[in-house]
Image (tube, rainbow, N blue to C red):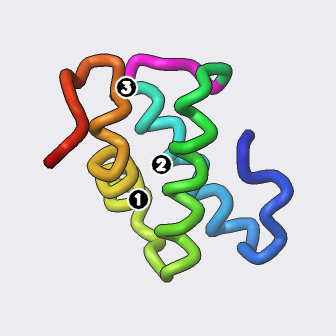
Amino acid sequence: MPFRNYHQFDAATVRLMTEAYDAALLQLGISSNEPMSGELAAQITMLADAGERDPDILCAKALERLKWTSPLSEAPPQ
């Protein structure tokens, strides 16, 4: 679980962040051991720190921010 040391969030928020993280990993087709997973966790953390609490939105926005780093993408967004 990538968010175990994030004491600025309560337990419920960490669960939502983890749900979003797991869903994003699944959509990207990668494991939590991949280098990209750390950036994914960082994006979810930034979104949650800004107040987002919906795991579907956390997942979608993190993926949107990272779409250029996906192994399936061809190039960074312009």
In the rendered image, the residue lying farthest to the front is: 78
| Residue tagged 1 | 58
Crowding near pointer 2: few (<14 within 10 Å), some, many (20+)? many
Q: Position of residue 46 (x, y in %)?
A: 54, 67
Labels 3 & 2 near each other (Cβ < 8 A): no
Residue 69 % position (x, y): 37, 32
In the rendering, at what x and y percent does residue 48 appear? Answer: 53, 70
Q: Is residue 77 above or below residue 72?
A: below
Q: Amino acid at mark 2?
A: Ala
Residue labelled with disc 2: 20
Sequence-first tag of 3 and 2: 2
Residue range in magenta is: 27-32
Residue in the image at 57% along x and 76% along y? 49
| Magenta-colored stretch includes residue 20 | no
Q: Quadrant of residue 75?
A: top left
Q: Earlier in the sequence, mark 1 or mark 3?
A: 3
Per the model, the C-alpha gap separating discs 3 and 2 is: 12 Å
The CA span between labels 1 and 3 is: 14 Å
Mark seen at residue 28: 3
| In the rendered image, the vertical position of residue 69 relative to residue 5, given as above or below | above
Closer to the camera in the image, 38 or 55: 38
Q: Quadrant of residue 70?
A: top left
